Every structure is written in structure tokens, then in C-alpha cells.
Image: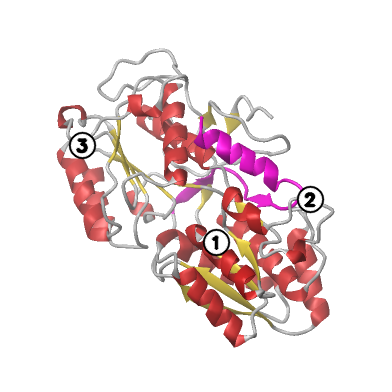
Amino acid sequence: MKRIISIILVALMVIGLFGCNTTPSESENSKDPSEYTVTENDMEHLEGAIAWVGGMAISSTSDKLQWRGFCEQLATWGNYNVVDMGPAEFTQAAQIDKIEECIAQKVAAIIISPVTDSGVEEVLQKAINAGIKVISFNGRATANVRTTHVNQCDPNAFAKQSLATSVLETLGEKFDYNQSTLVATAIKAAEAKGEKLKIGIISTLPDAAIQSSWLRCIEAAAAEYKYGIEFDIKYTNNDVAQGAVLLDSFEMQGDIKSIICLATNTITTIAEEIVQLNSDIKLTGCMWASSAVDYTATSTSDNAYDYAIPWGFGWDFEWWGEVLAATVVATLNGNYTGAVGQTVTVNPTATYPDGATLVTAETTKSTEVGGTELFAQQPLMYYAGNIAQWVDQENSVVNK
């Protein structure tokens, strides 16, 4: 299904072109994203560029998809210099050094995914004082040092739905694949059980910005359950192999039937350990369809509970990059200030699998760290009825 010709997401844009020390020209969607980047060694082109400052330099499949969506969306508005300024190591100190470098080179905008919940405020304020626009994604920068935050999806919706699937897995209840009624179904089933439930969570680091945000939202979502939910949270410390170790720990405890995984890169390790142990524990949470498909039912005639991952959630990283790029252009053009109620127009350059939907949303007040945010999409559910389709989509964009 075509992504939707014009999706309104959060700050009305006058269709104008802003050239970051470049000359605007017609869109050239056929270009490879690398043609829109400059390297750190090419410092003469950094003045006026858009600097992407992730937790690390772009390397993973998700990074590359988001980066490509970002570059291709920029191309629909004009020619831009964009540069990956992510550090070589995942530390706050390394990220701050990169931001300082961006300031020294007089970039036009910094697109940042903070490594931790706090600690970059001072250097980002320095950037703003230098006239640089700052927009955060993934982990939120605090409200006073950003125009807005572009989230991959509504974190509260992701939290409520992930928790609901884990509740149903814990109770062994029939699945509700309708995302509009899923949460209500789980709340009703938990109330019928009449006792507090215990659910496991595997995350990355205690202070990881995005995972910490999801955890807070999940804990808030638990308040809707009459008899309460107890969480047993364990951390991989960014070590993929620890996923199996933590699963072993949950298995030995014997009191956990479902785990919400917030460490995307660990989902396969955990699922494989469930298979090897012949464990009854089930997984849900955040995952790549292509990572989960070997551990998930692929036919609606299958019993989902015969598999380690009955269902899970994800989002389209390329589309997230497109929304982020459109927001940056609107900000640089002066058409977007991050105010509640503003909208951003996106010119989609890719496609979704049949049946997938995007949402229309306005800039909303952030419940996390103040300020405002916009959502690229609602969480996407993977299950037997559609996971093969999503795997095809992921493979097609990876090989595009």
C-alpha cells in the first residue's frame, strides 16, 4: 500500500527550500543516501550542514534504514549537506565531544539521540546560543534545549500494548489481535484472575534514555490493572550474550511466565535460549520482525503459544527518518517552532506492506521531560497473520 501521499504529522510547512550552504534543486529520489553526506574529514562543508549525532556512528540495520529515510526525505525538499557525527564509542563524554565539534564547525542543526537521560544540557544550550537548531529523537533531550522530540511511536501506546500482550501471555488467554481493544481485553482478563501478576522485563542499561522512557510508561500503564502488577527488571548492560543468562535466571526463579523485551538486539538470543531450555516463558516487546520470525507462528492455523514469541511490536525505521527530516526542514525554514497543535507535512518516498497504516497526529505536550513531541507512527504489531509480510518489507528496504 502506498505510504499515503501527504501525511500530516505535526507543524504546517510552507513548501519552501532551505539550502544549508547549498543551492536548492528539484527532488532526486533515486540518489543513494551517501550522496547527501559529507565526511568528518571534509570539514570545509560542515558549516551550515545538518549534523546527525546518534549514540554511536551509524552502523546497525536500523540506523541505516533511519538514515536513508532521513536523507531521501531531505532530497524532496532540496539539496542538503548532512553528516553522521555519531561517536565511535557509546559514552556521554564521546557524544559531548562531537556536539562541541558541531558547534565549532557552525552546523545549522543538530539531530541528537542522547546516550543517557541527562548530562548534555549544557553543551546543547551552548549550541542553541550559537544559533544552531536542536531536535532530539529516540532518547529525549530536555525541553529547554530542543525545539521538539520526534518519537518512533507513541510510547504510552507501545507500553500499554506490550504490557497487555504480556498479561495475556502470563494468563495463557486467547490473543486479541485488534490493537484498539487489546488493552481492554487484558485488563478484563487480569481482573477476572483476581490477583497481582508478576511480569519480567529485560532492558539494556538502567540509565539508557529510550528504554528508561519505555519503562516509566509501562509502570504507569500497570496502574490500570485493579490487582496490580509486579515487575522483575533485569539488564543486559548492552551485552547481547547476557540475554540468555537473564533468561536462565528467570527460568530458575520459576515465577515468570512472560517477559517484555526492550533490548531489540537481544530478542533472538533470548528466544533461542527459550527453545534450547524448552521453557514455557513467552516473549513480547520491541523487536525486528526478521529477528523474531524463526520463533513466531507464521500461519494463523498455528497455536501461537507453541512458539517463544507469540507476538511483538516494532516500527518502520525508514519512515521515522522521513518524519524527522521533514521536521528539521520545517524548523530550519522557520515554519515550525514545536508548539502544541502544529503539524509537519511529509513527502513519503517508500512503501508500507499492504494493510499497514500510518497515523495523522499533531504536536503534543510531552509527558516525559516537558516540552513537546510528535509521533512518527503508532506501534506496529507482529503476529502470525502478518509477520512474513513485515519480514519481506524489512528485507526489501535493507536491500533497496
Decide if residue 10 is in sight here.
no
The disc labelled 1 sits on which kind of residue?
Answer: Ile
- Residue 3 lies, with reference to residue 309, above or below; the image says above
Say if the magenta span includes residue 354. Answer: no
Mark 1 element type: helix
Determine if residue 176 is in view.
yes
Residue 229 position, x and y percent, is 65, 79
Marks 3 and 2 in Cβ contact (< 8 Å): no
The residue carrying pointer 2 sits among few (fewer than 14), some (14 to 19) or many (20 or more) residues within 10 Å by Cα, namely some
Residue at point 53%, 29% (across, down): 345
Does 72 sit above or below residue 218? above
Say whether residue 394 is left or right of residue 177.
left
| Residue under pointer 2 | 299
Per the image, the residue denoted by label 1 is 267
Quadrant assignment, res 279: bottom right
In this figure, which residue is indicated by the disc labeled 3? 40
- Which residues lie in the magenta part? 371-400
Picture coordinates of residue 193 (x, y %)? 80, 80
Question: At numbered mark 2, what does the secondary structure look like: helix, strand or loop?
Answer: loop
Disc on the earlier residue, 1 or 3: 3
Q: Amino acid at mark 3?
A: Glu
Up-down: is 36 above or below 391?
A: above
Q: Earlier in the sequence, mark 3 or mark 2?
A: 3
Q: Looking at the picture, how far across and down is residue 71, in whole percent?
A: 41, 30
Q: Earlier in the sequence, mark 2 or mark 1?
A: 1
Residue at 74 percent of width and 51 percent of height = 298
Tell me what residue is drawn at x 68 percent, y 41 percent. 389
User: Image check: 354 left or right of 88?
Assistant: right
Quick one: 26 or 32, which is closer to the camera? 32
